[in-house]
Image (cartoon, helix red, strand yellow):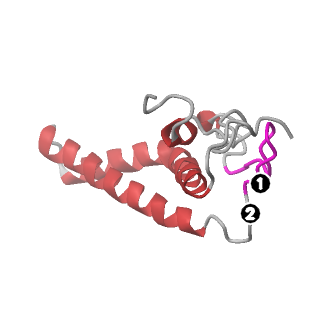
Amino acid sequence: MGLLKRGSKLFSIFHFKCPRCQQGDLYPTPTFSFRKPFEMYEHCPVCGQDYEPEPGFYYGAMFISYIITGWFCLGVVAFFRWILGWSLLNSFLMLFLIGGVLFVYFYRLSRAIWLSMNVKYDPKKREI
């Protein structure tokens, strides 16, 4: 079984698929469409898995998003500042530009990680 093949947690996380059946989508729109970027299905369209099992379920995803965003910001500024030799101001301006494009991706990625941590893959759950 490969790391990004069906049946692994990374498959459902990076393809934004249901962690239980790994066929249904988590979001109705593509990540970089910016049309309804925060809208998420309530249930999996394939297996019926509830994507919000309880109120406040995605509170933990905020911490995952914080960690991903923090390391990303450090990496981007370090790359532009020390590898490319840009000024600190230009490095931060590039960070804001890149971060402005990727904020929806980080939001969706953190929710997919949190949901995959709490839902087990079950290949037999492919019908409602």
115 over 66 or under it: above or below:
above
Instruction: Name the residue furthest right.
Output: 128
Residue at disc 1, secondary structure? loop
Q: Residues within 10 Å of mark 1 (few under 14, many from 20)?
A: some
Q: Which residue is mark 1?
A: 50
Q: Which residue is mark 2?
A: 53
How many numbered markers are drawn?
Answer: 2
The quadrant of the picture occupied by the C terminus is: top right
Where does residue 102 sit, x and y in percent of width and height? 48, 44
Q: Identify the magenta region.
A: 38-51
Label 2 near label 1: C-beta < 8 Å? yes
Residue lying at 40% horizontally and 54% vertically, measured from the top left: 68
Between 125 and 15, the residue placed more toward the observer is: 125
Q: For this view, does 71 lie left or right of residue 47? A: left
Image quadrant where residue 7 sits: top right
Image quadrant where residue 125 sits: top right
Where does residue 71 sit, x and y in percent of width and height? 32, 55
Q: Is residue 12 magenta?
A: no
Q: Looking at the picture, which amino acid does disc 1 mark?
A: Asp
Residue lying at 30% horizontally and 52% vertically, measured from the top left: 92
Between 11 and 87, the residue placed more toward the observer is: 11
Residue lying at 46% horizontally and 29% vertically, measured from the top left: 1
Q: CA distance from mark 1 to mark 2?
A: 6 Å
Q: For this view, does 118 lie left or right of residue 64? A: right
Magenta stretch: helix, strand or loop mostly: loop
Where does residue 94 sit, x and y in percent of width and height? 33, 44
Where does residue 67 sit, x and y in percent of width and height? 39, 60
Q: Is residue 43 magenta?
A: yes
Residue at disc 2, secondary structure? loop
